[in-house]
Image: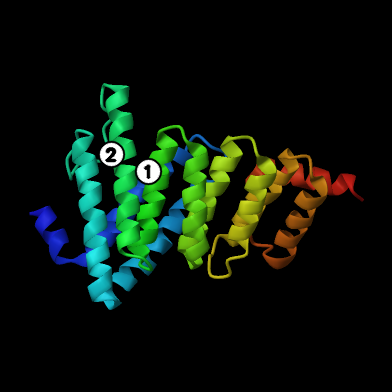
């Protein structure tokens, strides 16, 4: 019955997809120093945008959303789960898991290629990048997210750039992570842009670039004094600022 309801409502389809993506993001980011609330905020904003697009671009949007949902359901079932599963299970055989992920990374890319210019196509490429990352190929994941971000806008672009920043940070490339966070911070309609600039400052500090870190910290305090960074991050940035006086 739940699946039938989703089939009758393309906007619900898309919101369900975003919720699933959001669950995966929170799980993946929980071990990282980046504030989870920023990611959740981005996911919810993307849900609103994509849901609205599905409503007003019925023909192309419905087809793309249906194709993406079908691919996701097939992937979950191939991994041994069900549509109602709270998370995608992990097969006991690692080779089986890798084979399925590789197969469905290509499936999601095919969905994106068949429905260019739709939010669902961008989300399909995001999902393909997730699978590549889960396979241990972070470089391929970042490449997919970069290509998707180049065509995205607004909060959806911010979400993709944050994925890139997290991957760069996990690889110890703090300067590259900082640059990605700066791009998030330049998205004017993203309400957590200054938190992203705080993450950029933190990464530049880790990269040994205190001048860039302090410049971003001063920008945050000047343009958005109400923004509250993580206490230990704010303390470190204040120390760096004091050292430059």
Question: Which class describes the residues within 10 Å of circle 1: few (<14), some (14-19), or many (20+)?
Answer: some
Q: Is residue 207 left or right of residue 122?
A: right
Q: Residue furthest left?
A: 1
Q: Quadrant of residue 26?
A: top left
What percent of the width, then of the height, locates residue 102? Answer: 34, 37
Q: Is residue 228 visible?
A: no
Q: Is residue 35 left or right of residue 115?
A: right
* Residue that appears at 32% across and 23% down: 94
Q: Is residue 76 above or below residue 187?
A: above
Q: Quadrant of residue 186?
A: bottom right
Q: Secondary structure at mark 2?
A: loop
Q: Is residue 96 above or below residue 157?
A: above
Give me the disc on residue 134: none
> Which residue is more in the foreground, 219 or 92?
92
Q: Quadrant of residue 88?
A: top left
Give me the disc on residue 87: 2
Label 2 with label 1: CB-CB less than 8 Å: yes
Q: Is residue 3 above or below residue 189?
A: above
Question: Which class describes the residues within 10 Å of circle 2: few (<14), some (14-19), or many (20+)?
Answer: few
Q: Residue furthest top?
A: 93
> Which residue is more in the foreground, 28 or 122?
122
* Residue that appears at 34% across and 58% down: 112
Give me the disc on residue 24: 1
* Residue that appears at 53% across and 37% down: 32
Q: Residue furthest right?
A: 245
Q: CA distance from mark 2 to mark 1?
A: 8 Å
* Residue that appears at 64% across and 35% down: 172
What percent of the width, then of the height, locates residue 194? Answer: 62, 59
What percent of the width, then of the height, locates residue 216? Answer: 74, 56
Quadrant of the rendering where the N terminus is positioned? bottom left
């Amino acid at each position: 019955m739940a699946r039938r309801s989703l089939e009758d409502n393309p906007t619900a389809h898309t919101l369900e997809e975003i919720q699933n993506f959001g669950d995966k993001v929170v799980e993946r980011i929980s071990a990282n120093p980046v504030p989870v609330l920023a990611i959740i905020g981005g996911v919810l904003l993307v849900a609103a945008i994509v849901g609205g697009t599905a409503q007003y671009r019925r023909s192309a949007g419905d087809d793309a959303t249906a194709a993406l949902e079908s691919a996701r359901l097939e992937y979950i079932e191939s991994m041994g789960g069900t549509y109602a599963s709270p998370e995608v299970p992990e097969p006991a055989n690692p080779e089986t898991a890798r084979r399925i992920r590789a197969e469905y990374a290509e499936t999601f890319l095919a969905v994106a290629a068949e429905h260019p210019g739709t939010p669902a196509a961008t989300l399909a490429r995001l999902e393909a990048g997730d699978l590549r990352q889960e396979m241990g190929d972070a470089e391929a994941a970042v490449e997919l997210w970069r290509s998707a971000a180049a065509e995205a806008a607004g909060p959806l672009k911010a979400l993709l750039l944050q994925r890139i920043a997290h991957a760069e940070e996990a690889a110890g490339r703090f300067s590259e992570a900082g640059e990605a966070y700066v791009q998030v911070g330049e998205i004017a309609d993203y309400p957590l842009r200054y938190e992203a600039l705080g993450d950029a400052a933190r990464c530049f500090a880790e990269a040994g670039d205190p001048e860039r870190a302090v410049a971003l910290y001063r920008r945050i305090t000047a343009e958005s004094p109400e923004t509250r960074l993580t206490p230990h991050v704010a303390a470190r940035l204040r120390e760096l600022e004091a050292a430059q006086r």
